Amino acid sequence: MMTRTNSDGQTIPAMPRRIREEGSTAAVTHYVETRWPAIGGKDLVPLPEGAFLDPEFADAYQPSHVAYVYVAGSGDTLKAPDQPTGLHGLARRFALPLFKISATASENALARIEDINLERYAGMYEAEAGLACDPGYDNWRLVLIHPSRKPLLGAPVEARPRVIRVVLPSGLSLIGFEKELHERLSPAALRGWIASPAGRRHCADLRLDPREAIRLTGYNTGEGERVSRADEIYIFKPRLDGGRLLTIIERIVHEFVVRDAANDRPSWGWVAPNQGLGVSRFTQLARNASPVA
């Protein structure tokens, strides 16, 4: 925890140093000592330059349907920059760059954004008195992705300003692709990191309750409502991590094709522990990430 000594010789929490000017709409406006995790983990490296031109891939690849990987943020930042809401407000409070990353088959990713706005994706969390809802989670929008390089030659991948377009190989479903995408993004998943020792130290430094960062979504199913984990929130810096996201996508496609050609098709499936669980399950999750004293 950052501390300072007052005039009486007492050690007290120090105010974080401002790194953005007053009025900035950036999510992180003050310096914190936390080392943020990175998507893909510390061992992520790009494929060799000719990986997609090699016959091992080029001869085996058969195009199938298209997926669009997108990055989204939420909140009414422009309406009230001094009172950010939605995911932007959460990012400001926790001093973390937070975004939703996922994939869709829709040719216009804005259609998926409309869906998650209706669902108020990640708009709930388990508070001391029960489920609580935050404003601003009905105002999701696509954000610009800034890959640090172009896709490798021959890769069935195209980096566009707000999506990364991927022509999936035959045999790899959208659900299978999403599953593997989230697995490789998981080192920077907010839900997992906030409950880790590093995440709990971060919350202690800022005197925050980590339970607020364990986000949930309520899905109305007619007469009832299902509450599910919002697992697609990641610590991500679009201007710095765009290249890492591109590398993850390229590796998923390349590894699937090469392993499939070698009769070693990956068994990427869809296991959704967040679905069909009652609120009591989330109460237990919240207890596991108990508030900082």
Image (cartoon, grey):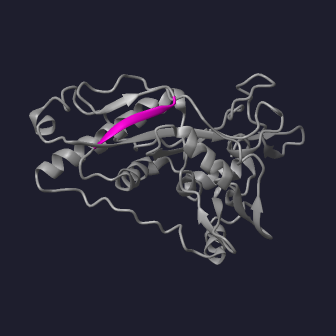
Front position in the image: 34 or 232: 232
Identified at 39% across, 62% down, the residue is 270
**Image quarter of the C terminus:** bottom right
Q: Where is residue 228 in the image (x, y as percent from the top left)?
A: 59, 65
Q: Magenta span has 36?
A: no
Which image quadrant is residue 154 in? Answer: top left
Span highlighted in magenta in the image:
162-168
Query: Does residue 96 appear anywhere in the picture?
Result: no
Say whether residue 152 is left or right of residue 30: left
Residue drawn at the location 78% of the way across and 39% of the way down: 84
Q: In this view, does 136 lie to the left or right of 199?
A: right
224 or 98: nearer the eye? Answer: 224
Q: Residue furthest right?
A: 8
* Residue positioned 37% across, 51% down in the render: 174
Q: Quadrant of residue 237?
A: top right
Q: Considering only vertical position in the picture, is 279 above or below 25?
A: below
15 relative position to 233: left or right? right
Magenta-drawn stretch contains 167: yes
Q: Can residue 128 be seen in this view?
A: yes
Q: Which quarter of the picture shows residue 246? A: top left
